[in-house]
Amino acid sequence: MDKAPDPAAATPEAPSADMPPAKRSGMLRSTAVFTAMTFLSRIAGYLRDWLQATMFGAGPAVSAFVVAYRIPNYLRRIFAEGSFSSAFVPVLTEMRERGDKQALQDFMDHVAGALLAAVIVISGIGMLAAPWIAKLFLLFASPDAGTVPLAAEMLRITFPYLTFISMTALAGAALNSFRHFGLPAFAPILHNLALIAAMLLLAKHLKVPEMALAWGVLAAGILQMLLLWPALGRLGIRPRFRFNFRHEGVRRVFKLMLPTVFSSSVAQVNVLVGTMFASLLVPAAQSWLYYSDRLTEMPLGLFGVAIGTVILPQLSRHHAQDDEAGYSKSLDWGLRMVLLLGLPAAVGLALLAEPLTVSLFRYGEFTSQDSQMVGYALTAMCIGVPAFMLSKVLLSAFYSRKDTKTPMKAAVWTVVCNVILIVALVTPMWKMGLPYAHTGIAAATAIAGTFNAVLLWRWLRRDGIYQPEPGWGRWLLRLALALVVMGVVVVGLREWIGDWTVMRASHRWAWLLIVIAAGGAAYGATLLLAGVRPRHLRH
C-alpha cells in the first residue's frame, strides 16, 4: 500500500517523496493510442495543407515560408523531439527506475533551465542573422522574386517558436517516460489548428498574406506548451528552472545529445540540403518538395514515430534492468510492426501519387502542373518511407543504451551519400532543362534514408545487440504476398476509374477513400488467410 503523501508535497515546490507511477499498458496499446492521436493531427495537417495550397498555391512567397519554417523546424528536431528527447528519456527512465523522487525533480529542474537558456540564445541569434540565413538557403533564388527578404522577415517571427516548442518537448518526453502518450500525441493538433486559424483570420489583414503562416507557427508553439506544461504539475514533477550547466544531469544529457544532432534528424538534414539545391531550379520546386514531404510524413508520423516513441522507454527499462533478452525481443517486435505498416503505406502512396495530389491540393491557386510535379516527387520519395520508419526504431535501440556516437557516424555517411546522389541525379536533369528535375532531390533523399537504415541495422547485428526472433522468413513472405494482392486491387481500381483530374472534388474524395479502403482490406484479408493473427502483433 502506498504511503500517505506529505501535505507539503501537494505543490510543485515540495514534491512528494513517492515516485509518480508509470501507466501499465502494452506497447501495442500504447502505439495504438499514439497513432490515433497522430491520425487526428494528420487530418488537421491535411486541412492546413489544403487551405495553404488553395489560398497561396506554390509561388515564391510560399517558398519563402518553406525556408522560414524548415530551419527552426530542423532546430526543433535537435532541441525538442529528436536529439534532446533521445538523450533525455534514457537518463530520466534510469532515474525513475532508481525510485529517488528528489533526485529526479532536481534533474528536471536543472535540465529545464539549461534547455531554456540554450534555446533562447539560439533563437536570438537566429533572429539577428535571419537575412544571412535566408540568403544561404535561397542561394540561387532570383533576386527579382523577393523571396530572400521575405524569408528573412518570416524567420524573425518563426525563430521564437523554437523556445516554446522545446519546452513542450521537455514536457512531452517526461510524460512519455511515465507512459502517458495521449496528451503529447494530441499536442500537434494544436499546431495545425493554429496555422489554419492564422490563414483564415489573419491573412486577409496582411500586406503579404503568406506572412500569416509564420505568425501561425509562433502561436502553435505557445499553445502546445500551455497544453502540456500543466500535465507535469499533475504528476508532481513540473520543473522549477535552475541554471547550472555544470549539474551532473545536465552534463549527461548534453553529452549524449551532442552526437545525436545529425543522427536523430538525418532526414531533416537531407531535406535542408535538398531545399538548398532546389533553389537552382524553378521557384516552385521548393514548394513541390514541401508538399510531397508532407504526404510522406503521414505514415512516418502515424506509425514510425509512434512505434519509435513508445519503444524508447521500454528499451531503456530493459537496458537499465540488464534484461538483454527482453531488450532484443522488444526491438524485434518494433521492426516487425514497422514493416507491417510501412511497406503497404509506401506502396499505396506510390500507386496513388496522382490521385492523392489531385484530390488533396488541386484547388484554387494550386495548378494542374503543381499537382503533377508534387505527384512525381511523392512517387520518388516513397522509396524511402519504410527505411525512414525503420530508422526511428533502430535509433531508439542505440539511444536506449546511451550510445549516441554510432548513429552519428551513420548520419554523417548518410548526408554525404545524399549530397553525392543529389549532384549525380539533379545536375544532368537540370542541364537538360527537364521540368521534373526536383524528383532527383526526392529520390536522393529516399535512397540516402535507406542507406542510413541499413547501416544502423548492420551495426546492431555486428555488436550482438539485436538477435532476430524465429519466423522472420515466413513473416516477410506473408507481407510480400499481401502487398502483391493489395497492389493488384489498387492498380485495377485506379485504371478502371480513369482520369482523376476531370472529376468533381466530391467524386475524387469518394473514389480515393474507396480505393484506399479496398487496398487496405485486401492487404489485411491476405494476411489473415496467410495465418497472421492479432496475437502475433502483441508484445
Image (cartoon, grey):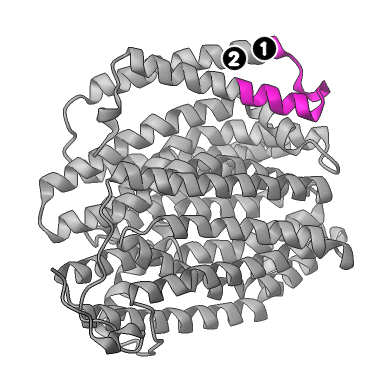
Q: Residue at x 88, y 60 (%)?
A: 144
Closer to us: 516 or 358: 516
Q: Name the residue under label 1.
A: 495
Q: Which element type, helix, strand or loop, lies under badge 2?
A: helix
Q: In this view, does 485 lie to the left or right of 251?
A: right
The image quarter containing residue 206 is bottom right
Q: Is residue 536 left or right of residue 194?
A: left
Magenta-drawn stretch contains 93: no
Q: Mostly what secondary structure, the magenta segment?
A: helix
Location of residue 270 with respect to 470 vertically, above or below: below
* Contact, mark 2 vs mark 1 (Cβ under 8 Å): yes
- Quickly name the residue at label 2: 491
Q: Position of residue 326 (x, y in %)?
A: 14, 46
Where in the figure is residue 516, as x and y percent of width and height?
58, 24
Q: Which amino acid does label 2 sit on?
A: Val
What is the secondary structure assignment of the residue under circle 1?
A: helix
Q: What stretch is highlighted in magenta?
A: 496-514
Where is residue 116 shown, x and y percent of the image?
47, 81
Q: Which of 104 and 116 is in front in this view?
A: 104
